[in-house]
Image: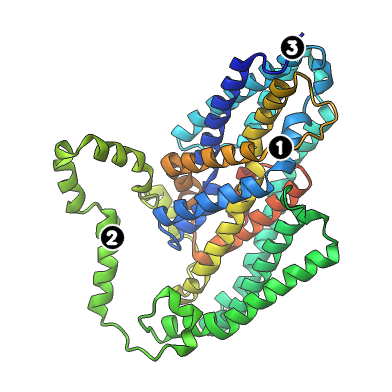
Amino acid sequence: MMAPGDFTFLFALGMIFAFIDSFGIGANDVSNSFGAAVGSGALNLKQAVFIASICEFLGAFLMGSATADTIKGGLIDVGLFSTQPELLMLAMVCSLVGSSTWVLFASSRGLPVSTTHAIVGAITGAGIAGFGISTVKWAGVGKIVLSWIISPIIAGLVTAAIFIITKLLILRHQDSLKRGLTAIPFYFAITIFINVFYIIFKGSPGLSLSQLPLGAIIGISFGVAAVVFLWCNFFLKVYLRRKLENEEPLRWYHSFYIRFVSVRTKAPEQIEQGGKGSKGAESGLESDGSVNSGLEALDDSEKTLSFFQKMKKKAFHGLNQDITKNTEAVDSIHDKATRYDPITEQLFCTLQVLTACFASFAHGSNDVANAIGPLTTIFYVWKNAEVDLSGTAPVPAWVLAYGGIAIDIGLLTYGYKVMATLGNNITYMSPSRGFSVSLGTSLTVLTCSKLGLPVSTTHCITGSTTAV
C-alpha cells in the first residue's frame, strides 16, 4: 500500500522530464507567436525572445490551469489506477519521456510539430499499456482530435477576414497611409478589448477574475479599450504621422507626449543609414544579410575568450541567428507575394508587436498544460498517495511557474530554428499580414483554452498563415 512520499524517484523523474518537455515546447512553439513578427521585420530576434519570455511566462502562470485539467485527467480513466496510484505516476512519467523525446528531436531539425499531439498521444499510449483500450476516455480524445481539424480552419477563416478587411479598407488605396492612420486607433482598441476580455473571462485561479458577472467583464474591457483608443487618437496617431509622413527623427517614448514635442528637422539620410548600419554591425549582419568582417574578427579571437565568455556565447547562441536568410525556393515564393506601400506597412509594426504579445500570452496559457498536466498528477499522487478521482485538485502555482520558466529557457536557446520555418519560409510576411496572423491565431487559441480544449497552436498558426 502506497504511503505519502513514496516513490520519490518517480516524482524526481517527472520533474526532470516535465522540464525537458516544457523546454521543447519553448523551442518549438515560440514561432507560433513571434515568428511572423521577426519574419516581417517588426522585431529582431533578440527583442522577440525577450518579449516572448515575459508573455509566455505570464500566460502559463496566470491562465494555464484550465487546459492542464484536461491533460492531467481528461484523457484516461484515472479511476482504474485507484488501487495502485503509483502506476498512474509511472504512466505520466512515461508520457513525459515519450513526448519530450519527440519534441526535442523535431526542434533540433527545425520541424514545427504539435506538442499537444505529442502529449495526448503519449498519455493515451501509456493508458493503453497500463490497462488496455478501456482505460482511454475516447470521447475526450475524440474531442481533441476533432479540434485538430477544426482549429486551423477556424483560425484561417478569422485571419482571412481580418486581412481582407485591412486590404479593402486600407492597403489597396492610393491614400493608404491616411486611411491607416485613421484606422489605427480602432485596431488598437479592438485588440486591447479582446485581450482584456479574455484575460478576465478565463481568469487566473488565484484572483477569481472569471467569477465576475459577464456585464462587468465587458464593461472593464470596454473601459480599458476606450482609454487606449483615446491615447492612440490623440497621441499615437500624431506620432506616427510625424514620424512616417513628415519623417521627423522621433524616439518611441515621444509617442506618450508627442503633442508637447517641438517640430524636428528631418535627419540627414547619411546619419539614418549610419544608425541602421550600426545595428547591423552589432548583430554581425550587413543590410543585405551577409556576414560582416566583425564576426570574422570574433572568430579569429575565439581562442582568447575566457571560459565564462565561451559559456555565455554558447548560452546566447540562439539570439544571434538570422532567420530571414532565404534559399532560392523561398525567394521565389516571396517574389510572388503582393507588396503594399512600405510606409503604410510600418503602421502595423507596433500593432503586430501587440498582437504577437497577445498570441504569445495565449500560447503560454494553452501549451504549458502539455507538460505540467502530467506533472500535476504525479505531484498529487506522490503527496497524497491517492488518485484525484474528483478531478478538482487545483494546479499548484509553483508547477505553473516551473513550466513557464522552462518554456522561456527553451525559446531563448533553441527557438530560432522553428521560428525561421513558420515566420519566413512558408510565405512572405509583412507587418499587416503578421498582425492578421497573430490576432486570428490568438483568438482561436484563447477561446479553445477557455473551453478546456487543448488545441494545437501549430495547426492554428499554419492555418492562419495559409489563409493570409
Q: CA distance from mark 1 to mark 2?
A: 45 Å
Rendering coords of residue 408 (x, y %): 50, 43
Decide: is 128 above or below 293.
Answer: above
Which residue in the protein does label 1 denote?
395
Instruction: Tell me where residue 202 appears, x and y as whole percent.
Output: 75, 53
Task: Tell us which disc is closer to us: 1 or 2.
Answer: 1
Give the amino acid at mark 1: Val
**Pointer 1 or 3: first along the chain:** 3
Pointer 2: what residue? 280
Look at the picture and state if 447 lies above or below 390: below
Farthest residue to the top: give it.
Answer: 1
The residue carrying pointer 2 sits among few (fewer than 14), some (14 to 19) or many (20 or more) residues within 10 Å by Cα, namely: some
Mark closer to the observer (3, 2): 3
Q: Which mark is residue 230?
A: none
Given residues 64 and 159, the one toward you in this image is 64
Amino acid identity at mark 2: Gly
Residue visible at 65% across and 55% down? 442
In which quadrant of the rendered view does residue 457 lie? Answer: top right
Badge 3 crowding class, 10 Å Cα cut-off, few under 14, some 14 to 19, many 20 or more, is: some
Residues at marks 1 and 3, CA–CA distance in whole angstroms = 22 Å
- Residue 2, label in figure: 3
Give the amino acid at mark 3. Answer: Met
For image coordinates 71% across by 14% down, the residue present is 86
Q: Position of residue 53 (x, y in %)?
A: 50, 49
Relative side of 351 to 2, left or right: left
Mark 3 and mark 2 lie on one chain; the one further toward the N terminus is 3
Badge 1 element? loop
Q: Are marks 1 and 3 in contact (CB under 8 Å)?
A: no
For residue 433, say whether it is visible.
Answer: no
* Residue 418 or residue 282, whichever sits in front: 282
